[in-house]
Image (cartoon, rainbow, N blue to C red):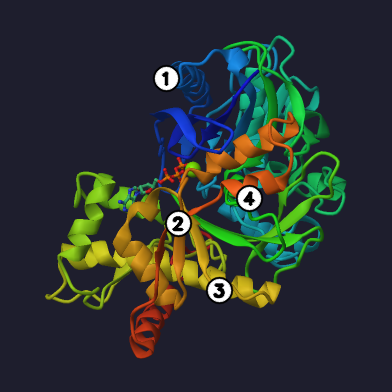
Amino acid sequence: MPDAVGAIDQGTTSTRFIVFDRRGIILAQAQREHEQIFPRPGWVEHDPREIWRNTHAVMREGLARAGLEPRDLAAVGITNQRETALLWDRRTGEPLHHALVWQDTRTDRHVAALARDGGRDRFRAVTGLPLASYFSASKLAWLLDHVEGARALAEDGTALFGTIDSWLVWNLTGGPDGGLHVTDVTNASRTQLMSLETLEWDDAMLGVFRIPRAVLPKIVSSGGVCGETRAPFPGVPVGGILGDQQAALFGQTCFSAGEAKNTYGTGCFALMNTGPEPVASTAGLVTTVAYKIDGHPPAYALEGSIAITGALVQWLRDNLGLIGASGEIEGLARSVEDNGGVYVVPAFSGLYAPHWRDDARGLIIGLTRYANKGHIARACLEATAYQTREVLEAMERDSGCPIAELRCDGGMTVNDLLMQFQADILDRPTLRPKVSETTALGAAYAAGLATGFWKTLEDLRDNWAVDKRWHPRIAAEERRALFAGWGRAVERSFGWVEENA
Ligand SMILES: Nc1ncnc2c1ncn2[C@@H]1O[C@H](COP(=O)(O)OP(=O)(O)OP(=O)(O)O)[C@@H](O)[C@H]1O
Ligand SMILES: [Mg+2]
C-alpha cells in the first residue's frame, strides 16, 4: 500500500520535490536552484532543459532520502511558477527558445498598444485579468513572432506551447514518446487566453494575440489523474496540477468562500477563495480559478499579485552585496530602530496589484545623510508589508469579506521582524502554520485526493495547525504615518518608463 504522496514544486528560483505522509508531514525533500538569465534590462529567462534536469534529479533524490520506492507513492502532484511561457518541438523535446519568465517585461509595448484601444481592463470580463506583460499570452505571441520558424511549427502542431506545468507533465509522461500535452485550469487562467466561464480557450482571445489553437495544451482539472510517469521512474499516477499560488491556497486548506492566505516568496500573492462563481474586481485585483476537483464545480479566487518581495532581499544580496545570505537581512534591519524615513519601491517589473503600472520602476527615496544600510534593509522588508496591506484592502473592498487575521506562508515568513511589522501595519494578527511548505503540500493534497489517498477536504483541514501568531503592537498614528509615506513613494515610481523609449 502506498503511504506517501510526492509533490514537485517548480518555482521561480528553484525546484523542490517533497514527500508527504498521510498527516501532511514532510518525510523528505530535495531542492536545486536554476540559473536566472537576464539578457537585457527587464528581460528574464529560464532554460527549460535545466528545469527538467533539476526536476528529474530532485525526484530521485527526494524519494531516496525518504527511503521509498516509486511504488510507495500514491501519486505525484505538480505545482509551478505561473505564467512563465515556452515553446518546444514535440518531435525532439527541444525548446525553441528559453522560457520567458513571468517577471519579463519585454512585451510592455505590445500590451500598451492593445490597451490604447479599449483600455487596460478590456479583457477582464472574459479572462479576469487586466492587460499586463505579466500574463502568458503576450509572451507566447512574442515567441511566435521572434523565434525563426516558430509560427509555422505552431500552426502545424509541431511546436507545443506550455506553462511550466505542461512542460513537466509532457516530460514526465514520455516526452517525444507519447507525452501528454495538458495544463490545468489554474495555470490556464493565467494565460489571458481562457474564458473564466467556460474554462476553455477563448477564440476571441486567441484572435487578439494571434495564437494558433494547434499549439495549445488541453485544459484539465487541478485534481484528477491525467496519466502515469515514465520518467524519472515509471508507474506513478500524475494528478494534482495547480499553479503555485493556488496550490498554497489549497495547502492552507482555504476551501471555503472568504478564506484567504498570503505567500511570501519571490513575490507575494494573496488569494481569497470566493466560491463557485467568479467575482469581478474593481479594486485592482485579478479574478482567477482557485482549483477544480474532478466531479465538483470550480472554485474561484480573487488575487492580489505582488511581483517583488523576497526577490528584493535577493537583490540586496546579489546586486548590492549588502548581505551575504537572505537570512542576514533581519539582523541588518534590527541594527536600526526604524526606517529613518527611507522607502524602497521595488517596481522592478513595473507594479502589479493593485496599481498595474508597467511604466513604474524601482526607487529608493527619503535619503538623507542620516540613512545607512540598516535603514535600507528595513525599508526593503517594510516594502513587502506595505504592498501586502494594499492588496488586502483591495480584497476586502472587492469581496465585502473582512479578513480578521492573515494566514501566511513561504520562505520570508521565517523573518520575525517582517511578520511583526506585517501585523503592525495591517492592524491584524498574522499567523504561520506548522507546515510552511504549503505550495508543495497543496499539490500533494490535490494529487492525493485525485487518487483516493485522502478522501475528503475535511481530512485535510484536520492536518492544519498554527505554529506562530504575531499581534499588532504599534499606535494608530504611527501606522497611519508609515503607510502614508509608502503611498507617496509609490506615486513617485509611476511613469518612469516612457512609452516610446
Ligand atoms: N530570513 C529571511 N528574511 C527575508 N527573506 C527571506 C529570508 N529567507 C529567505 N527569504 C526570501 O524568501 C524567498 C524564498 O522563499 P520561497 O522559497 O518561499 O520562495 P519561492 O517564491 O517559493 O521561490 P520560488 O519563486 O522559486 O518558488 C527568497 O526570495 C529569499 O530572499
Ligand atoms: Mg514557490
Query: Residue tagged by mark 3?
Result: 404
Tell me if mark 3 has few (under 14), some (14-19) or many (20+) residues whose alpha carbon lies within 10 angstroms of its own.
few
Q: Is mark 4 within 8 Å of ligand 2?
A: no
Res 354 quadrant in image = bottom right
What's the CA distance linking mark 2 and mark 3? Answer: 14 Å
Q: Is there CB contact under 8 Å for labels 1 and 2?
A: no
Q: Nearer the viewer, mark 4 or mark 2?
A: 4
Q: Earlier in the sequence, mark 1 or mark 4?
A: 1
Tell me if mark 4 has few (under 14), some (14-19) or many (20+) residues whose alpha carbon lies within 10 angstroms of its own.
some
User: Is 501 left, or right, of 192 in this rendering?
Assistant: left
Q: Earlier in the sequence, mark 1 or mark 2?
A: 1
What's the CA distance linking mark 1 and mark 3? Answer: 40 Å
- Outermost residue on the left side: it is 369
What's the CA distance linking mark 1 and mark 4? Answer: 27 Å
Evaluate whether residue 129 shows in this view. no
Query: Residue tagged by mark 2?
Result: 432
What's the CA distance linking mark 4 and mark 2? Answer: 15 Å
Q: Amino acid at mark 3?
A: Ala
- The local secondary structure at tag 4 comes to helix
- The local secondary structure at tag 2 comes to strand
In the rendered image of this protein, does residue 280 appear above or below residue 486? above
Q: Position of residue 47 (x, y in %)?
A: 48, 27
Query: Residue tagged by mark 4?
Result: 461
Tell which of 63 and 485 is nearer to you: 63
Name the residue rendered at 69%, 30% in the picture: 453
In the rendered image of this protein, does residue 112 appear above or below residue 490? above
What's the CA distance linking mark 3 and mark 4? Answer: 19 Å
Q: Nearer the viewer, mark 1 or mark 4?
A: 4
Q: Is there CB contact under 8 Å for labels 1 and 4?
A: no
Q: Amino acid at mark 1?
A: Arg
Q: Earlier in the sequence, mark 4 or mark 2?
A: 2
Q: Position of residue 73 (x, y in %)?
A: 61, 21
